[in-house]
Amino acid sequence: MVVGQAQAKLLVDLGLVFRVGLAEDGEESSEGIDQIFDLLASHAASGWAGLSCAVEGGDGRGALGLGLSDPLGDDRGVGGSIVDWWARSDPAHRHPHLATRWQQRADTLGVAVHHPAVTLPETVALARVLADLEWRCLVAIAFEPDLDRFYQHVAHRTHASVATLTTPWCRDPLRDWVARHRVDFADQRHRFQAQKLHAGWQTPVPPPEKGHFK
C-alpha cells in the first residue's frame, strides 16, 4: 500500500514537471528536464524500494513500472530506443558528457547506467524534438548540409555529442531515423528543393504544411 501511494505521488510529481517544468514551446534545456531525475532520486531516497528493480520486475509497464517507456508521446518508442542505444554503446567515447551525467545518476540510484531511470531525462528531451512538427518538416525537406541544424538542436537539448551526431561515418541510430524520415517524405523534399532551386537562393519558398510530416 505504501509503495502504491509512493508511485501515485511520483506520477503526480512527474506530471507537473511534464506540464509546467517543460516549456510548451520546446525551448527547455536538459538542465530543466533534469528535474525529472531529481524527482526519481528523491523518491528513491525516501525508501521506494521498487525504483531500482521496477523494470526488471517485468510487469510490462515500461520505465520504472509506471508506464513511462513512452514519455510525452515518444512515437513508437523511437526516442527511448535511440537513447538506450547511446547508453549501451560506449557512451564514454561517443557521448562523453552524457556518459559522465549518466554515471553520476546511476551511482545515486544504485542502478546500471542504461537503466531507464538514468536516461529518462534525455529520452523525454529527444522524444519532444522528434515529435516537433517544425523539426520533422526541416529534416524531411532540408538540403543535406542544413541537417546539421537538427543535430545541433538535439545535442543542445540532450547533451549528446555534436561531433558524433554530425559525422557521416560515425554510426548512430539518430542518423538512421533521419534517413528513414527523409525516405518517407522524399516526394515532398524533391518538390520543395526543385522549387527552391528554380526560385533562386535569395527568394523565399514557403515549406509544405507542417501537418504533412506527422
Image (tube, helix red, strand yellow):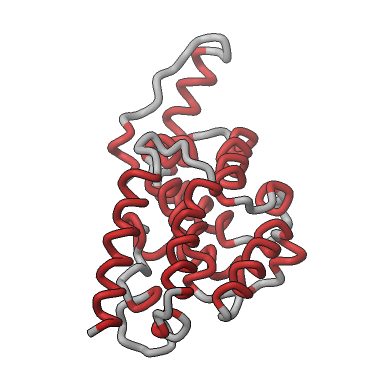
Front position in the image: 79 or 159: 159
Question: Percent position (x, y) of residue 14?
Answer: 34, 59
Establish if 68 lies above or below 33. Answer: below
**Picture residue at 31% right of the left edge, 47% below the top:** 19
Counting from the top left corner in percent of width and height, residue 41 is at 49, 68
Q: Position of residue 36 (x, y in %)?
A: 44, 58
Q: Give 90 or 100, whichever is nearer the viewer.
A: 100
Residue 79, above or below 6: above
Whether residue 12 sits left or right of residue 171 in the image: it is left
Query: Left or right of 207: which side holds 199?
Result: right
Which residue lies at the image location 52% right of the left edge and 57% below the top edge?
Answer: 122
Q: Is residue 195 visible?
A: yes
Residue 205 vs residue 16: left or right?
Answer: right
On the rendered structure, is 123 left or right of 107?
left
At horizontal 53% and vertical 43% (from top left) the residue drawn is 29
Q: Quadrant of residue 176?
A: bottom right
Q: Is residue 187 at least partly visible in the picture?
A: no
Q: Is residue 206 above or below residue 202?
A: below
Locate the N terminus by quadrant: bottom left
Residue 84 position within the rendered picture, expressed as x and y whole percent measured from the top left: 54, 69
- Depth check: 185 or 86 in front? 86
The front one of 89 and 197 is 89
